[in-house]
Image: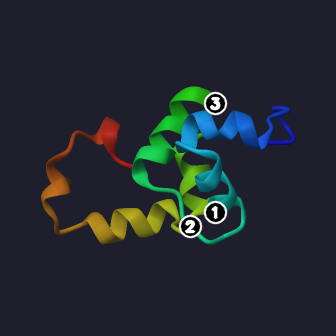
Amino acid sequence: MEQQGLTRKDLAEYLGSMSRVSEVLGGKRSLSLSMIRSIHAGLGIPYEVLLQETGIKSGECRQVLSGSPFNNIPKRFHL
């Protein structure tokens, strides 16, 4: 927020509401996949950074997804 000069009200556009912004910033709610996509598309923040904010690291995502139907996703879509 500081780097881009954003306010809580600005984040509501990407998270859905002011109450969600408060929950996310207060640690009561994790970012959902749709929130991550919205933030990435709107603010250009890399997925890897947003996933780390939720406590998931890129390597862990690959490990969790291995052996799943997601394996057949083309490489350009892999995390």
As drawn, is 57 to the left or to the right of 27? left
Instruction: Tell me if 79 is positioned left or right of 21 in this view.
Output: left
Instruction: Name which of mark 1 and mark 3 comes first in the sequence.
Output: 1
Whether the residues at callouts 2 and 1 have beta carbons within 8 Å, the answer is: yes
x, y percent for residue 53: 63, 61
Quadrant in the picture for residue 23? bottom right
Circle 1 residue: 23
Residue at disc 2, secondary structure: loop
Q: Position of residue 51 (x, y in %)?
A: 53, 57
> How is the structure coloured here?
rainbow
Distance from Cα at disc 1 to Cα at disc 3: 20 Å
Q: Is residue 58 left or right of residue 12?
A: left
Residue depth check, mark 3 versus mark 2: number of the one nearer the observer:
2
Q: How many marks?
A: 3
Instruction: Say whether marks 1 and 3 touch (CB < 8 Å).
Output: no
Task: Identify residue for label 3.
Answer: 43
| Quarter of the image with the N terminus in it | top right
Kindly identify the amino acid type of the residue bearing the numbered disc 2.
Arg
Residue at 19% over, 55% down: 70
The answer to which image quadrant residue 20 occupies is: bottom right
**Lower sequence index among marks 3 and 2:** 2
The amino acid type, in three-letter code, at marker 3 is Leu
Residue 68: x and y, percent? Answer: 16, 65
